[in-house]
Amino acid sequence: MLRGALKTVGSRSQCGVEQLISALRGVSSSSQQLSGSGRTHASSCTDGDPPKILITGGLGQLGVGLASLLRRRFGKNNVILSDIRKPPNHIYHSGPFIFSDILDSKNLRELIVNNNISWLVHYSAVLSAVGENNVALAKEVNITGLHNILDIATEHGLRVFVPSTIGAFGPSSPRDPTPDLCVQRPRTIYGVSKVHAELMGEYYHYRYGLDFRCLRYPGIISADSQPGGGTTDYAVQIFHAAVKSGHFECNLRSDTQLPMMYIDDCVRATLEFLEAPADTLVSRTYNINAMSFTPQDLTQEIQKVLPDLRVTYNVDPVRQAIADGWPMALEDSAARRDWGWKHEYDLPELVQTMLTHITPGNQVAQAN
Ligand SMILES: NC(=O)C1=CN([C@@H]2O[C@H](COP(=O)(O)OP(=O)(O)OC[C@H]3O[C@@H](n4cnc5c(N)ncnc54)[C@H](O)[C@@H]3O)[C@@H](O)[C@H]2O)C=CC1
Ligand SMILES: CC(=O)[C@H](N)C(=O)O
């Protein structure tokens, strides 16, 4: 049936054929299965037009920074931020913003159709520490929400980016470094939901041809946005405390080594990966790495600039147990080989840059 239908559009552009394949999904179960090559469809065919991008959960730590980079690349009006929260004025006025709850699939579908979205960056999530405090919410947002995203992205032939995390690994994974492919038995609902996202996205890719792309981010460090309740949050908060009061109480042990990345590297990696030609991607999920450090290493580096910084330790057992099962470094040679990933910020550059951005008058309100 699919072959017959394809014959009738033989003279049309490849993009038209691929859209037809999308439309025929749902006609019969056998016609839904594309070849095992997992080839992708309409999202790759923009006829030279820039993609129209929707970012879900865009008001968190990472969304605004990514939107700003994507808007510089593709034009302000081609990138829509969305969230369930009201944006601060400066974000509202910086480009298109729209309410979208990923648990409301009808609203999400309307938004994608009405705005002719071709790329979807799915940032909505409940992070590791908040997730352990509210497992039901984490299941709803991270698993049910993801199902809505994958179904709608498949229906409309979107390219979809879903970040995973170092939290997708667990104590039985090799930890230093952690390769792309290894045992993944995380012990948080956040980690379990992210492994689920990796597997579901890859399944939809091979089963339906969805252009699913996933990077496992380390802990991300940013100056002008606050983290949303994770285990790596200390590495952002320490900078604000260092500048504001000169004292920081750290909730992880001083020797806890975790992989980290400056936000500019993270959003650039995301853009480069989104733009990578599909045929260069050997995998749909890649580790990306930049630096690894402990609270003690970070303190010493900050003290080179602010020698009076004093750090005390009051370990949070929930966060410490999470961190003790996470990678100490990620192995990312496949990302470097397949699509040219290269980080720019190591620990000294990170500290210099953070302290340049954070001044006593430029403190970001604590979000959580
Ligand atoms: N920030 C980090 O260090 C890392 C982040 N990631 C991933 O990157 C993505 C973005 O992370 P962040 O910006 O740090 O997260 P965040 O926690 O700061 O922001 C998440 C956003 O999702 C929104 N949200 C919650 N429920 C929603 C719903 N029902 N519908 C729509 N939006 C909803 C929240 O309002 C919030 O603005 C997440 O998927 C996270 O797992 C992965 C590894 C590290
Ligand atoms: C590394 C992450 O995914 C996040 N920052 C968290 O700590 O939960």
Image (cartoon, rainbow, N blue to C red):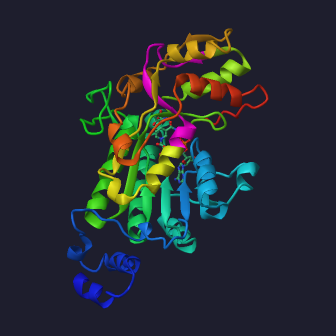
The image shows residue 263, relative to residue 88, as above or below, that is above
> Which quadrant would the C terminus be assigned to in this image?
top right
The image shows residue 42, relative to residue 316, as above or below, that is below
Q: Using residue 120 as the reference point, say whether residue 60 is left or right of it.
A: right
Q: Quadrant of residue 309?
A: top right
Magenta-drawn stretch contains 102: no
Magenta-drawn stretch contains 265: yes
Residue at 62 percent across and 36 percent down: it is 226
Q: Find the magenta span and give its range.
A: 249-267
Looking at the image, how many numbered discs can be counted on the residues?
0
Q: Using residue 289 as the reference point, say whether residue 185 is left or right of it.
A: left
> Horizontal and vertical percent for residue 55?
55, 56
Front one among 44 and 358: 44
The image shows residue 194, relative to residue 176, as above or below, that is below
Q: Quadrant of residue 259?
A: top left
Residue at 23 percent across and 76 percent down: it is 31
> Which quadrant would the N terminus be assigned to in this image?
bottom left
> Horizontal and vertical percent for residue 141?
46, 50
Q: Quadrant of residue 298?
A: top right
Q: Residue furthest right?
A: 361
